[in-house]
Image (tube, rainbow, N blue to C red):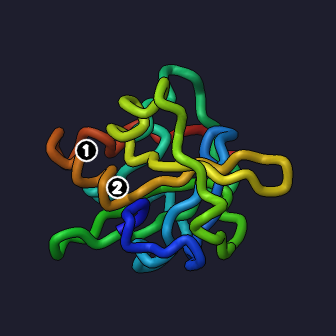
Amino acid sequence: MMGTASHSSNSSLRLLVFTVGGVKLAADAEQICSMLAYDQDDDCDITYWLHEMLSFGNREVVFRSPEILTVSLQETIYRIVIDQPEDIIYIAMNRIQPLPALVEPFSQKKGLWGAVALDEQIILLIDFLKLISITRNTGPNRFCMREKPSLQ
């Protein structure tokens, strides 16, 4: 699991970097089963929109290049819609910084566990397994939006 002491300071983490609502995020690529093209007409009941899971509030989130990541947890496949997948990168564990104590209570409830500075940008690290574990207790349709976000 990401963010645990089982990683040595010399080891690296393979991350998928992507953007949602203008926020740069990355997830452990080992947590991702596959990446699928987003199909606007697909109404799967277990499709989670990441901006909703992270509570981006009432501001409009415009998707430019949406993709679906599949994540497996306890023999169930969950689909998470992200935007603008960019790259797979390797980051040394000793470059990852904990989130400030001020935001830690909020961030842990959203599966956010650290940050890394890369090319003068801060990338927030997200643990999809933790986020799904927390949010699936609210019911499978809680984050399945009936009204799709704007696509560009």
Residue beneath the point at 48% across and 55% down: 81
Residue that carries the numbered disc 2 in the rendered image: 47
Residue found farthest to the front = 9
Q: Position of residue 62 (x, y in %)?
A: 64, 39
State the residue in front, 82 or 8.
8
Residue beneath the point at 43% across and 31% down: 55
Q: Is 121 rendered above or below residue 79?
A: above
Q: Is 90 rendered above or below residue 26?
A: below
Which kind of residue does numbered mark 2 sit on? Answer: Thr
Q: Position of residue 78 (x, y in %)?
A: 30, 64
The picture quadrant where one finds residue 132 is bottom left
Spatial CA distance of label 1 from label 2 is: 12 Å
Residue beneath the point at 77% across and 56% down: 118
Residue that carries the numbered disc 1 in the rendered image: 135
Residue found farthest to the top = 58
Which kind of residue does numbered mark 1 sit on? Answer: Thr
The picture quadrant where one finds residue 135 is top left
Q: Secondary structure at mark 2?
A: strand
Q: Secondary structure at mark 1?
A: helix
Tell which circle, 1 or 2, labels the residue nearer the N-terminal end. 2
Residue beneath the point at 45% across and 73% down: 7
| Of labels 1 and 2, the one closer to you | 1
Instruction: Rate crowding at label 2 as few (under 14), some (14 to 19) or many (20 or more) other CA atoms within 10 Å.
Output: many
Q: Position of residue 14 (x, y in %)?
A: 58, 76
Task: Specify whether 27 is left or right of 132.
Answer: right
- Asked if residue 125 can be seen in this view, the reply is yes
State the residue in front, 117 or 134.
117
Q: Is 3 rendered above or below residue 62?
A: below
